[in-house]
Structures are given as C-alpha cells and as structure tokens.
Image (cartoon, rainbow, N blue to C red):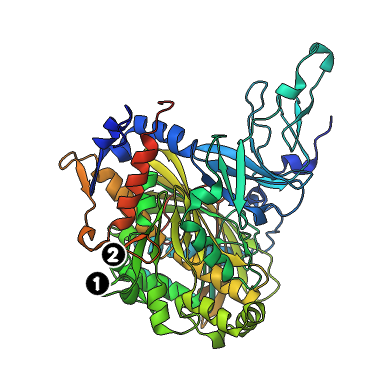
Amino acid sequence: MDGSPHSGRWDGLIEPGRVHGSLYYDEAIFREEVEKIWFRTWVYIGHESEIPDANDFVTKSLGPMPVLMVRDMKGEVRLLLNRCPHRGNAVCVQEKGNRARFTCPYHSWTFANDGRLIGYAFPEGYKDAPKSELGLGQVPRVESYRGFVFGCMDPEVIPLEEHLAGAKRTIDQACDNSPTGEIEVTAGFLKHRTKANWKFILENECDGYHPAFVHSSIFSVSDSQIGSIYGDDAVCVTRALGNGHTEVDVRPEFRRRDEPLSWFGTTAAKLPAYVEQMNAAYGPEKAREIMIDGMPHVMIFPNLFIAEIQIFVIQPVSANESIQNVTAIQFKGAPDMNRRLRQQTMGSVGPAGFLLADDTEMYERNQRGLEIRDPEWLFLKRGEHRERQDEDGFTIAHSTDDLPSRHIWEHYRSVMSRPGREA
Amino acid sequence: MSIAAEDIAGPEILKEWTGADKTAVRADPALHFEVSQFLYREARLQDTHDYDGWEALWTDDALYWVPANGADIDPERQMSMIYDNRSRIALRIRQLKTGRRHSQTPPSQLARVISNVELLESERDDIRVAANVMIFETNLRGDVVWGARAEYTLRRIEGELRMAFKKVVLVNNNKAIWTLSFLV
C-alpha cells in the first residue's frame, strides 16, 4: 500500500474487510511478527505498583521473551534480559522478589540490578576483560504512562505517548475512577494458556458481536446488562483510536441511564466509602460524571486489554499458542471497591471463569477451523456501511461491528510492511 | 560466596503438597473408611457431571477454593481461580446446566483417582481431611493430566457427611494452565 518492496506480500494477505487464514497459523509469519511487532513497537510490560520499592523485581514478558522488570537501587524502572552474557544461563529463576544483585549459578558472575557486571569468580583468569561491556542486556526503551510500563527493543521508536494516540484518554479515564487517581496491580495474575494465535484474543477483546452468544449461558442465569450494551439496538459504539488501538465505548449507554456506578452493576448506596472518597477528590459534580461513565473497555495494541475492571496482558508463545494473564484492577486507597473488583474478576475470568473459559474455547475452535482450507479467508465486513467520524475525527461504528478488527489489521499491515529484518 | 535461603526456596506449594505442616492424628479406621467413601463418591459425581448430586453435598456456608500462585495465598487479597461461596457455587452449577457453557459442551470426559487420604487435626467437631488427586481430562482440544492436593472440611448433618470447605491446590497453579471448566 505504501509502495515499499515489502508491502506487496502483506497486501496479498490483508485486504479491506478480509484477511487470510495463514496469518493465524503460519510459524514463519509468527517469527516475523516477533521481529516487527513485538520487538519494534511499544509493548505493555507491567505496572509500577508491582515493584513499589527499590530493588523489587518481577518476571514479565516482551512477546515470547521473558524480561525482569526491576526497580533498581536508585528507584529507576528497568527491563533486564535474564541471560548471563557469559554462557546464556538465567541469572534469576524466581518469579518476583527484592534483591540488589543477581548471581548466575553457573560460574557465579554477579550483576547489579541496573545491569552492570560487578564481579565474577576467580577474577585472575580474566586479564583486562571489558567488564563494562559484559553487563546484562536491557530493553533499550522503557517509558511509563500513569504507572503503566511499556518497553520497546527499537531504540528509535516514537515516544510512548505518541504511540498511545487516542488510547491515552482511556488510560486517563481508568485512573480517574480511582479516588487517588492511581491504579494498582497488586492482586497477582491468573495465567490462562490457550492453543490459539494471539490475534484471535486481540480481536475478540473489542468484538461486541459475540457476547450475546458466547456468554448466553451465564447471562441467562444471572443479572445481565448485556442486551443494552451488545444488543442490536445498543447505543454503544466501537472506535478506532489509532495505531491499532480499539475500544468499545460504553459511556453512551451509562450516560443515558444517568446513574452513578450503574456501569459496575451497583449503586452509590452500596459503596458509600468509595463515593465519599470520590466526592472529596473531584468535587461532587465531576465525581458524578466519572462514576456515571465508569471504566474503559480498550485494547491497546498489541497486548494490553483494559476490560473495565480487569487488565489482561496477552503473551504470544507460538503461532498456535498464547497465554492470557489477567488480574483485577485495584484503586489505590479504596478497599470497599477493591474487594468487589476482585470478587467480580475471580468469577468472570481465568481458566475457570464464567466468561473467559468460553471465550478461550472459541479461540481454540477458531484455530482448529483454520486448518480447513476452504474458504481460505476470514470475513470482517460487518458494519462497513455504517462507519462514521466522531467529533474528534476518530472512526466509530456500532458496538457489534467489525471496526476494531479492521483497524487492527490496517495497523498490522503497515507495521509488517516496514522494511527491516525478515525472520 | 553464600546463598541466602530465600534464593533457593521454591513455591510453598511443595510444603502443602506433602502436608508436612499438618499432623494426621485421627487414626480411627472406621472414620477413615467412611471419609474415603465420601471422597470417592464426590469424585464420581464430578466425573459423571452429576451437577445436582454434587451441589447437594455442600453445606449452606460452603466455600469452594482453587487458589493460584501458591497454596497459602490470602484469598481476600490475591486472585484465585475459583473462590466461590454457596451462592456462587449455585451459579456455577446453573451455568453448566444451561447446556450453553461452551467449554463444557460437549463435557470433558474425566477419570480421577483420589489417594493418600489423611485425616487432619481439627480444633472443632468438623472432620478435616487431605488427599491427593490425579485427574485425566480429554476434550475437544486434547488430553490433560491434572495433579493436586485437596483439603476438605466435612461436617455430619443428620447423619450424613457434607462438604463445608474444599480447597484444591493444583501442583502447577503458579504456571499458565489450560481452561479448567469441569468441576475440579
């Protein structure tokens, strides 16, 4: 599409409104995605609240690659690569902890938590070894936005806030729901493995067409708001936020209801402490607006899904396998709210969740279906005729339309068509 | 060069797995037999998807808990895979019975083995018991073997044993696991 010699192949796989099945199962394409998406664009890693104190660390991932997210002894957040520069051994096999240095168990090379090599066993054997060049590898670009830490392996990547584009507003919206303006990720992750390509998960997150069917079992036996959000006559919209980011904007429905905390299926009377904190923090008028609008439903390309009360972090393993890491969002300093956030999250998501077990079943059936080679293409044209621009110039469509998938694939094609290392 | 103990300590799961911190004291063979029979029956109800039969085993104050990321996490602070009170157990069963719980349509085919049944010390009249469980599951995706140490609190109500508490510590609950939508 941009006339570069690299775009032709992708133009043959990604057309407006349809994509080729091989994009989900071809291992060579997966390896190229690792190079061009996971290692060249911004990827969500973790949240600053997971490493609150100096020397805290937690194991995270950047695409299929593990990284250590550390707060070094000076308080700076770094992403260290867990590979001893000597022979490639892991310098840390713990999932999380607090330590100022990491020692490789193989030959006892020791590194400070800012990555510097600070010592090795029997140093007489290394005459004039360039210690300064033998530190741990690091993700060269690390930036955070309101506590959300992103990393990029390309030192020349655009600034994070530019990359976030229209999704920045949704992170602000999420943080505003906390009376302290801060979100915390402190409840630990459920890790759900699935035999499916990561892009089925990515596209499902803002697919408002499926809930009425995939989740009808739980909606039919519990109080459900589903019809008003993802029904045929819903007033909610999907929105393309730029750079592959997409959302289902549920605010129109909740503004119509005009009831604080209706978005959370509850009322102000049931969460008095939280409401009081919100009023004190923002003033009653602004607090009311925030509590009517509620939390965002946004998929930040390629791997951070803020699903109202949860965050999901999508981790690709191979063309045919992925992991969904999920936890409850917590609002700093709002215990009555946080308990409900955890309880609802535990019911809904993870390997045994009322919702996610069935979403994940769909991903796996999709993946197996692609081995059937006719038709070769997937059809993504729903709602093309009713796309329109909102007042800010973003494209929107009905909450059940395929606009999010179309936007994701448009961005995917432009990123994959960039010249550079082929896998 | 010294290595701090915390550097080598594995997940707490292992300690819980062996039951090393709990004493098996009640050696009453009749009670051991009765409790074992109860556990086998519960296993059979689960394996055969007898949802009503399984739900009827619970007491009104039931708690059904499958922790994540260890055996001794605080379920009031940390995420668990299942942390159901009685009404949420009922909701789980109602969902399964709709026939539209896609991850159980068709239902997983299951065979589980309960073993290493140990009666544990109990401060109240409740009967506390721990057992190992291995579950073979086959479904549309493929075959999975699950391993867990399970802990129960049983109570005698009108002569019948009932479950007030069941905790299932999957041995690999700190790792990414496949969908777990059958009754574990």
Query: Does mark 1 fall on the same chain as mark 2?
Result: yes
Figure quadrant of residue B49: bottom left
Q: Are marks 2 and 1 in contact (CB under 8 Å)?
A: yes
Label 2 packing within 10 angstroms: few (<14), some (14-19), many (20+)? many
The percent coordinates of residue A33 (x first, y second) are: 41, 35
Q: Residue at x 80, y 13 (%)?
A: A128
Give the answer, above or below, for where A334 lies relative to B102.
Answer: below
Q: Which of pointers 2 and 1 lies earlier in the amino acid sequence?
A: 1
Q: Residue furthest left?
A: A374
Give the answer, above or below, for where A279 lies relative to A298.
Answer: below
Viewport quadrant of the C terminus of chain A: top left
Q: Relative to B80, is A383 on the left or the right?
A: left
Q: Relative to A263, is B69 on the left or the right?
A: right
Q: Relative to A334, is B45 on the left or the right?
A: left
Query: Disc 2 on helix, strand or loop?
Result: loop
Residue A400 circle label: 2
Amino acid under label 1? Asp
The percent coordinates of residue B113 (x first, y second) are: 46, 52
The CA span between labels 2 and 1 is 7 Å
The percent coordinates of residue B160 (x first, y second) are: 49, 77
**A176 or A46: which is nearer to us?**
A176
Query: Disc 1 on helix, strand or loop?
Result: loop
Q: Which residue is mark 1?
A: A232
